[in-house]
Image (tube, grey):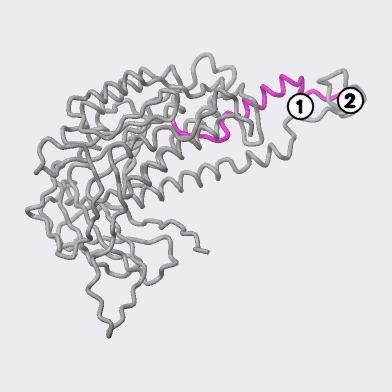
Amino acid sequence: MQVPKTMKRVGLIGVPMLLASTMLIAQQQQTPPPAPANPQNPTFRTTVYYVSNTVIVRDKSGKFIPDLKQSEFKLYEDGVEQKIQVFTPWIGGRAMGSVASVPENKPVRSEGLIFPQQRVQSDQSGRIFIIFIDDMHIPALDSPRVKDLLGQIRDNLVHENDLVGFVSTGYSSIQIDLSYDFKHRRFNEAITKLMGSGMKPDEIIEAAQTAEGPVGIRYNAHVAFGTAYDILEQLEKVTDRRKSFIYVSEGYHFDPFRNARYKLIQEKYGYDPDAQKSDGSNSGDSSNSGSQQTDPLDDPYYRQGNAFAEADLVNELAQLVNAAKRSNETFYTIDPRGLNAGPDIGMNNRVDPGEWRDFITETVGSLKVLGDNTGGFCICEQNDFKKGIQRIDNDTSDYYLIGYTSNNPDPLRLRRQVKIEVTRPGVGDVQYNPDYVLKKTKAKK
């Protein structure tokens, strides 16, 4: 697909700089240290994988239960009970190490993980937030609304000992490394630089048409998903803190405003499907008298490229969800459009209400997929962002961090089902990631 110069980008923005300059991450050793080898007793080892999971346990009234013990948890993978090796309650954003039950065979982590220096060295509190601003899917006119949203996140979510990093996907070029932003300098810098560069509905309708729909639509989505995916791969190596993606975007649709685009092209070619001559030929173009004019959209390659647009989007979202689950990362998606009543006045003559509603449903649905399938949620179709942000703060402050080394009997099974039970009476809701997907490894030559 030919991409206009205005849409070309060099690589994925900010991914290497976001984490590499503040965290020099070495690959963690994810298995307990092996016992000394005995030449008379050979050891046969199976493939193992260290898994971390954040668990939120509430009673029947919806309140978090803060005093559970490791012995009150049962953990299963594919129906096989696993031994919990790491168990840390986090209350109010602080690791309660004094009451945590951490066995001696806790997985050993190699040196190399370097965070910015913390003001209180003995304090293990803090969460990791990636503020992901998908400004390639935020039109310029919505920039003030997003700036206000970031201000609410700054004032109601981030605390002194939280690590915060920023990255944008578009021309705002926001690349701010993970840091303890207790004076909000970094937040204010990101707010100042932000400028949306997404396509407006009329620009989508008027864009050049390709076999994959309007030019730039899928390319912009690939940039956003690729940027997020690379950050998740980096954060997969961090297993001792709660990690959250604050994903600000107006969502995705690979085949938007189809009828409006068709109508514009028909007008351009002078094609009127309702105007037929008595002999059955089209009367749209007198120069083609004596021959039937064909529909300019009757292109098998065009139809084939758009027929599977929704399936292609679902597949790309699924890949991002799988990466988030491997990293034990929670997505909290936020749609800055808020409650949408309908198209702008200037769009009424180009987009009918039903097609507009389909566009909103599809774009909001893509954001809900990322939130609902990673343990988070979407702040969508509502104007009260503060309430949702406070809910994020609550969910990321009180939880149990559980880690175990999977010894699955089937090493070829990529998707693993996880089940966590709490044996204490009176427990209501137990929230955790119920599955994860291993990466496909290439066979060595």
Q: Nearer the viewer, residue 260 or 398?
A: 398
Residue 411 position (above or below residue 254) = below
Q: Is residue 294 left or right of residue 374?
A: right
Residue 120 position (above or below residue 51) = above
Residue 341 position (above or below residue 334) = above
Of all residues shown, which one is farthest toward the bottom? 40
**Residue named by callout 1:** 273
Query: Which region is colored magenta?
Result: 251-278
In the image, residue 273 lies in the stretch drawn in magenta: yes
Q: Which mark is residue 278?
A: 2
Q: Position of residue 319 (x, y in %)?
A: 46, 48
Of all residues shown, which one is farthest toward the left? 98
For the residues bearing labels 2 and 1, Cβ distance under 8 angstroms: no
Count of numbered marks: 2
Q: Which of the 4 quarters of the picture holds residue 192?
A: top left
How many angstroms separate mark 2 from mark 1 (CA)?
A: 14 Å
- Mark 2 or mark 1: name the one nearer the start of the chain: 1
Q: Residue at x 20, y 33 (%)?
A: 180
Q: Residue at x 26, y 67 (%)?
A: 82
